Amino acid sequence: MSDQLNPMAPHHLPFYLAPGSGTDTLMVVMGIFLIGTLLWVGTLYWRLHSLPERMAHKSQKLQFEFVAVLGLISLFTHMHIFWVAGLLLALIDLPDFGTPLRSIADSVEKIADSTPGQDGGLAEAGPAPAPAGAQDAAKKEHSHA
């Protein structure tokens, strides 16, 4: 065979055409670009998917665990309603009913422990004991007299 080019063939090939005996540079560049884009889109997806959980964690919400579970359910089932529900829960500030109820329960427990009587009943109401300062003053008056 002859190494000469056909006279009808162009003498200068464009840069994007691979030479007959080399590597296709454009294909290598596009492969690297495709892998980079895929990693970038995947990272963007993960960050967007964890948005409700990060929002609830930053604001110290009580419903943080529930938001995290909704995020996992939406990730594994591909049902976006769970993600939307988690986002709404992360945005809404639920009132804290636990702290006041815990305080009431502690107060009632202190009252129950401090009541006189063994069997839970109230003891006979007798005269109230005098304060400690009044007893000391009474002792001093008796000693001076």
Image (cartoon, helix red, strand yellow):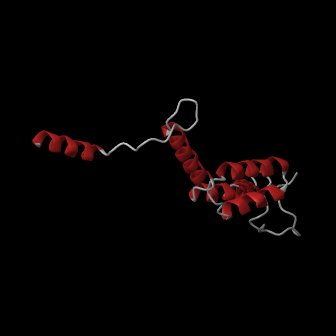
Nearer-the-camera pick, 133 or 8: 133
Q: Residue furthest top?
A: 118
Q: Relative to residue 85, is residue 106 drawn left or right?
A: left
Q: Residue at x 78, y 61 (%)?
A: 84
- Residue 15 place in picture, x, y as percent: 74, 65
Q: Residue furthest front?
A: 145
Which corner quadrant holds the C terminus? Answer: top left
Nearer-the-camera pick, 57 or 115: 115
Nearer-the-camera pick, 42 or 16: 42
Q: Is residue 138 visible?
A: yes
Q: Residue at x 36, y 42 (%)?
A: 129
- Residue 96 place in picture, x, y as percent: 61, 57
- Residue 99 place in picture, x, y as percent: 57, 52
Asked which quadrant contains residue 19, the reply is bottom right
In the image, residue 114 above or below residue 89 = above
In the image, residue 80 above or below residue 76 = below
Q: Residue at x 80, y 54 (%)?
A: 20
Q: Is residue 22 visible?
A: no
- Residue 59 place in picture, x, y as percent: 58, 59
- Badge count: 0
Q: Residue furthest left?
A: 144
Nearer-the-camera pick, 13 or 61: 61
Asked which quadrant contains residue 119, the reply is top right
